[in-house]
Image (cartoon, helix red, strand yellow):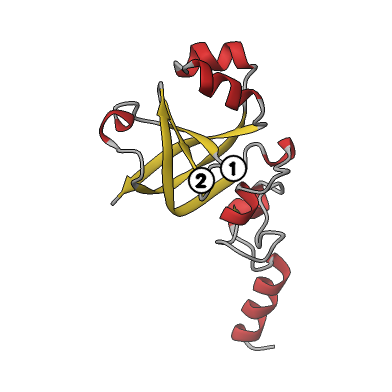
Amino acid sequence: MTQASALLGVLLAIGTSSPEARANPRTPEVDPAGEGKAGFLSADQVFAEDLPRSFADWEVYLDDVPVRRKSGRGLWIGYSNRRQVFVVPADPSFVSFVVVGATVDVRGTLRETPAAPQAAREFGLDRTSTKMIAREPLYIDAWSISYM
């Protein structure tokens, strides 16, 4: 056996998945819908009507998503008024300078939404957003947000 074929055998035995995917089996190498970047949920999945709590701790990459409203320390983003997700940026000052209607790129982790009273206190939500977040199982804890 040549050195090259031995190396190929080792690589095939290890697999082609990333170290992150091997360390975290909840993160798929290719998402179930076959869309989006490997290891991340696609926008179609994030904005689905039935986003299950089981997606908590999964990472998301969202591009060109409109900001629908601002509330407290976060933003409501979505492609329609009917289906939106709450985003809490790592830097709360981001909320003050982004405008409603701007499109944003979001990189973050889905987290379980706390109970509405706790979310209102934690995120500084107004009454409308408190009612909205009570219906959402998950929100995005964003480590990166950029906008145009």
Q: Residue 41, percent across and down?
A: 61, 52
Query: Which kind of residue does numbered mark 1 sit on?
Result: Arg
Contact between labelled residues 2 and 1, with CB atoms less than 8 Å apart: yes
Q: Nearer the viewer, mark 1 or mark 2?
A: 1
Q: Which mark is residue 147?
A: none
Residue 42 visible (yes or no): no
Name the foreground residue: 129 vs 141.
129
Q: Residues within 10 Å of mark 2 (few under 14, many from 20)?
A: many
State the separation of the CA atoms marked 1 and 2.
Answer: 8 Å
Q: Residue 13: horizontal and vertical position, in percent?
A: 73, 69
Residue at 55 percent of width and 40 percent of height: 84
Q: Kindly indicate the quadrant of the structure image that contains residue 9.
A: bottom right
What residue do we see at 47% from left, 19% from top?
A: 123
Quickly name the residue at label 1: 82
Is 88 in front, or is 135?
135
Q: Position of 84 compared to 100: left or right?
A: right
